[in-house]
Structure formats: structure tokens, C-alpha cells
Image (cartoon, rainbow, N blue to C red):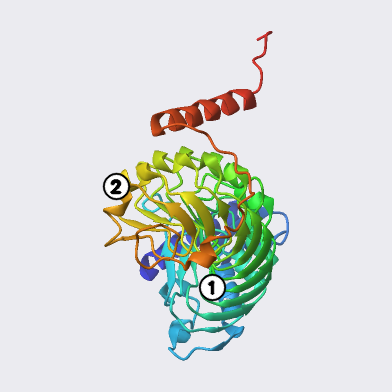
Amino acid sequence: MKKTWLLASLSLLQVIATQAATSSEGIGIGIGGGGVGVWIGGGPNPNPNPNPNPPVSKLQRAYSALQTWKSAIKEDPLMVLESWVGTNVCAYKGVYCVDPKEGLGDPNGPVIAGIDLNNGNLQGTLVKELSLLTDLSLLHLNSNRFTGLIPLSLKDLPSLIELDLSNNGFSGPFPTQCLLIPNLIYLDLRFNNFYGPIPEDLFNKRLDAIFLNNNQFSGQIPPNMGNSPASVINLANNRFSGDIPFSFGTIGPRLKEILFINNQLTGCIPEGIGLWQDLQVLDVSFNSLMGQLPNSLSCLTEIEVLNLGHNKLSGSFPDVVCSLRTLVNLSVTNNFFSGLSQDCSSKRYGGFDFSVNCIPGLNGQRPEPECSLIPGGGLNCLRLPGARPLVCGLLVETQNQKQETARPPKNPYP
């Protein structure tokens, strides 16, 4: 290759020399590390370096960002970053590159599309220079020892789809910069030290998975929770208080799992819960929910796990719930239920737990004095009366009316 390039250069020199002998114009040639440059004119080359500041490639910017981040990591007992040496960032452990135009001769070459340092036991902080990785789609940092705040610059990652910061030591209020990442779908902040309220905008984003469990979030759950299109929402093991939002019953039909375990929630379970006919897991255990259960629970035709245990719920347990064909695990332990149908009584073993209630004739119930004063006995929960087909039909009709009302009026002058 070098010999061919040299012969071509020599041929060009011969042509130029011939032209110079017959021309009154000045002719020059420059040969350097960047190739051959030819100019014709009356004097010296007017621009000896046509591109004095060549653009920095994406991989060069990535190298700068990753080396800055590496310097902020103080402990690496598993030697995960041992390969983070040199400019070939695509060879770094945990770094994944793709060629966005492979086979099309893309002059920009490969880009960093993913970083996966899960279970690396790395100790350090994140750096603002991570925003230079503008093609990054996945950032997985599960199970490390990262601490401090989330850099504000993460909002400048336009390609980021999945952000997993779980099981670290991050702290501070809810990192709202995560909600400014334009294409984010998966947000996992669980098992950290975040605190304070969560913003309403969380449920306005097109997130499919929201994991906030095992932090120190507090305050009321935003009333617009029903706006979320997510399929999984986990708010367990925090300090949320107040009622479950009424809009909880109008959340998108894609919802498969929702968990409120171990918070400080009070009030009633919303009647609209029956609208989630695709819901598979509902866990509201270890709260202070009161009142009677909504009959609309019987509309959850895909439910597999229903955990209402360790609350202050009362009344008769809806018998049709025990007849749901997909229900595998049902727990209402440590409540104040006072009635149970024959169908439910026949299923009180295996995955069905009715212990520590006030149900006559069943073993393992509360002492009589505890059942004489039902917590929240005067609580008025909005309930739809009637059998299952009527209740589920009313819910769907009510939801359709709400959606019709929410639609903008048609333009009479198209």
C-alpha cells in the first residue's frame, strides 16, 4: 500500500514539474502525514493547513469521558477497570460498541452504545463527563458502591433507554434530571438512599418500568399516578403516606405489577382497581389501609398474586375473589376481616392465608377483645354495590365516560 501511494506521489510530481516548466503560474506541492496537497497560484500556499482543528471523533470524546470517570473510582477490588487503558475504548471491559452504519462506510465509525458494570463492587462517584457518551443506550451500574449525587448532565444523553443505578449508595432528593432524558423507558433507582417526595412528572413520562423501592422517599404519592403507561411500578419499602391516589384505579391497561409494600399508606383501596384487568401482581401489605374491600377486586381476571396482609381492613372478604381462576397466592393475614365464604374457606391452605383476622370458626384468629373495636369502622369508602358482572360493567362504562369527556371537542369548521 505504501509503495503504491509513493508511486502515485512520484507520478504527480512529474506532472507538476512538466506544468511548471510551461506555466507562468506558481505551482507547489506539499507532502505530509495527512497525504498530498497541491496548489496553483502566484505565491506560496495560502492555507498550508486547510484543517488546523479537525473534529474530535466520538470515540475520542468517549476516551476522555471514561478516563475522567475512571479517576473518580477509588476502589476496584475485582479489577474490573484493569482493561481501561489506551484509546481503544471498545476493548474496555463492560463497554459495548456498535457501528450505527455498519457496511455503509460510515466515516464516524463505531460508537459506545452500552455500559454494563453490574456487580462490579466499584467504589466512587459518577462524573458529568458521562454526558459526552451521546450514543449511549444502556447504563447498568447495579450492585456497586457508587455514592453522591446523580450528575445533572445525564439529561444530555439523548439515546439513553435504560438507566439502572440500583443497589448503590446514591443519595439526595429524587434525581429529576433522569426525567429530562428524552427517550428513557426503564428507570431503576431501588436500594439507594434517595429521600423526599417524588415529582408528579414521574407519572407523565413514557416509562415502562419504575423501580423506586427501598429508599427513603416520603410524602404523598402524586395524584396523577394514573397517567403512567408503565407495566411495572414498585414503590415498596419507603415512607409514603396518605391515601392511595384515586387515579390509581384509572392507570393504563398495560400495568402488570404494582407494589406498595411497607409504607405508611392509609384510607381505602380505590374501587377503580378493577379496571386493571391485566394486572398480575398487587401487593399493598404492611400499611395501614382500612375499610371494606372493593367488590371490583373480582374483575382482576389475570391476577396471580394478591397480598393485602398486615393492614387494618375489615368487613366480609369478597367471595368471588377466591374463585378467580389465575389466583395462586392470596394473603389477607393480620387484618380484621369478619366473614369468609365457603369457597374461600375451602382454599385457606396452600397459597391462601386468612390467619390473624376475626373470622368465626377459623383457627389462628385474633383474640375476641381485639375484634370488638374495628379500626376505621366509621371510614366511608366509595363502593359500587352489586354482583361481579354489574360491578365490572359499571367500571368500564364509567371509564369510557371519563375518556369521552377528556377528549377535545370536534372542530365544527374543519
Name the residue rendered at 65%, 74% in the picture: 171
Q: Tag on residue 84?
A: none
Q: Can residue 52 be seen in this view?
A: no
Query: Circle 1 sits in a helix, a strand or a loop, which is it?
Result: loop
Residue lying furthest top in this view? Answer: 413
With 1 as the anchor, is 288 left or right in this view?
Answer: right
Q: Where is residue 392 in the image (x, y as percent from the top left)?
A: 44, 32
Q: Which marked residue is nearer to the observer: mark 1 or mark 2?
A: 2
- Tags 1 and 2 touching, CB below 8 Å: no
Disc 1 marks a residue whose amino acid type is Phe
Q: Disc 2 residue type? A: Asp
Give the side of residue 212 with respect to residue 128, left or right: left
Q: Is residue 292 left or right of residue 217?
A: left
Q: Where is residue 150 in the image (x, y as percent from the top left)?
A: 65, 70
Question: Does residue 300 lie above or below 67 as drawn?
Answer: above
Instruction: Say which of 97 and 163 sits in front.
Output: 163
| Quarter in which the N terminus is drawn | bottom left
Q: Mark 2 points at which residue?
A: 343
In the image: residue 374, left or right of residue 276: right
Q: Which corner quadrant of the image does residue 98 belong to?
A: bottom left
Dot 1 corresponds to which residue? Answer: 191
Q: Nearer the viewer, residue 358 or 155?
A: 358
